[in-house]
Image (spheres, rainbow, N blue to C red):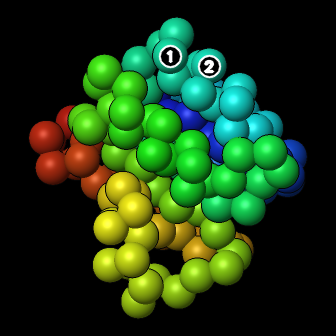
Amino acid sequence: MKVLVVDDNPVNRLLPLTWLGREGCEAVESADGQDALERAGRARFDVVLLDLSMPGMSGREVCRALRALPDGERLRIIAYTAHATPEGLDGFKAEGFDDVLVKPVSRAALLRAVLRDREARGEAS
């Protein structure tokens, strides 16, 4: 599984990259929306963990742009934010997100959200 972790704060990228790497995922980091879109245009990702509050392009703008890519509808895009509640998932789904993780995120919550589809297909974690 290939995961793109997008957050302007390096600390907020470090833990997900580490935890996902330990689960056998290929985790790639991006510090901003423009870089994330460039990477997604060059490589196929399964999941994008996407911060909402970034300079330049917001996570919402990046989500819309990712969905507009030729293969964008199959992506699992997870909002990664300190400015939401899990109960607000319906609003995020309406914007194109598949799930939301509220910072600070636990290892268990991250793995549950990111690896959900892999586990449903019966792949080892």
Along the line of sight, which residue is nearer the eye, 38 or 81?
38
Q: Residue at x 55, y 56 (%)?
A: 60
Left or right for 10, reference 38: right
Establish if 82 lies above or below 78.
below
Looking at the rendered structure, the kind of residue marked 2 is: Glu
Instruction: Mark 1: give few (<14), some (14-19) or many (20+) Cα within 10 Å.
Output: some
The residue shown at (29%, 24%) is 71
The vertical placement of 125 against 88, above or below, is above
Relative image position of residue 116 (x, y in whole percent): 29, 54
The amino acid on which the numbered mark 1 sits, given as a three-letter code, is Gly
In the foreground, 29 or 91: 91
**Residue at image x 57%, y 43%?**
62
Of all residues shown, which one is farthest toward the left? 121
Q: Position of residue 70 (x, y in %)?
A: 31, 21
Residue pointed to by mark 2: 38
Badge 2: few (under 14), some or many (20 or more) residues near its Cα, within 10 Å? few
Left or right placement of residue 69 versus residue 31 in this view: left
Which residue has dot 1 on it? 41
Q: CB under 8 Å between callouts 1 and 2?
A: yes
For numbered disc 1, what is the local secondary structure?
helix
75 vs 60, left or right, is left
Q: x and y percent of residue 86 in the render?
A: 45, 83
Residue 61 coordinates in the image, percent (x, y): 57, 49
Q: Is residue 61 visible?
A: yes
Front in this rendered view, residue 66 or 19: 66
